[in-house]
Amino acid sequence: MPSAKVLESKKAIVKDLSDRLKNSCTGVLVDYKGINVADDTALRKELREAGVQYSVVKNTLLYRACEDADLQGLQTTLEGTTALATSAEDYTAAARILSNYAKKSKTFELKGGYLDGEIIDLATLDHLAKLPSREILLATVLNAFQAPIASFARGIQAIVDKGGVEACAPAAEEAQAEEAPAEAPAEAPAEEAAAAEAPAEEAAAE
């Protein structure tokens, strides 16, 4: 019969696994049999760099953790060797990396997974694995807005290069003055016209 210390240790492991399942947006279970040390090291490194937590787990302990995390649907996959890959933010990384490795191996297989607390089948995992990475998705979204933002930035930079808004104002006023039509010459006042005609009339009378 296991000692109290061993039981407490197992309870702690189950709790850690349960918290890990609850706090992740996605998780993938794999049968890792047949993988060699070099490939396992490289795979773990790639997953770690992608923000994916990967570890070998005991089926009995993960079984209890699935119950606590309300992921009982995963329990049917807990046979043979099992490793769990979870991600707190990236929905595609674990599925993509593990699926790519499984394609190169005759024994390494994906067994199941979940997405936002819902169990997903192998077909859904395959679709998930084919989605672009989070970085590519973000870059695509940013590129969609890049053109108008770039145009606006160039306009602002042009103003800055000319010395700011105040420096650009005189140039704008000059441009408007050149475009405005020339004003017609003002007519002489009536009194001035009468004064000009008076001498001529006096000369005619003499």
Image (cartoon, rainbow, N blue to C red):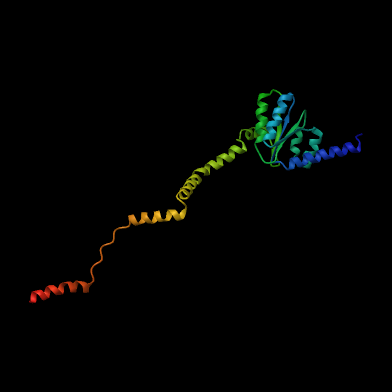
Quadrant of the rendering where the N terminus is positioned = top right
Q: Nearer the viewer, residue 183 or 44?
A: 183
Which residue is at a point 68% across and 27% down the rendered structure image? 102
177 sits left or right of 58 in the view? left
Q: Find residue 139 and report its image quarter.
A: top right
Residue 70 quadrant: top right
- The mark tally for this picture is 0
Q: Position of residue 151 (x, y in %)?
A: 47, 45
Residue 52 seen in render: yes
Residue 35 showing in the rendered view: no
Foreground: 53 or 82? 53
Q: Give the residue drawn at x 29%, y 59%.
A: 182
Is 1 above or below relative to 167? above
Q: Is residue 79 left or right of residue 173?
A: right
Residue at point 10%, 74% (across, down): 203
For this orientation, the residue located farthest to the left is 206
The image quadrant of residue 95 is top right
The x, y position of residue 108, in whole percent, is: 71, 26
Say if 90 sits above or below 106 in the image: below
20 sits to left or right of 129: right
Residue at 34% of width from left, 57% of height from top? 177
> Which one is nearer the viewer's eye here, 172 or 62?
172
Instruction: Point out the image quarter for the C terminus.
Output: bottom left
Horizontal and vertical percent position of residue 67: 78, 40
Q: Relative to 56, is 176 above or below?
A: below
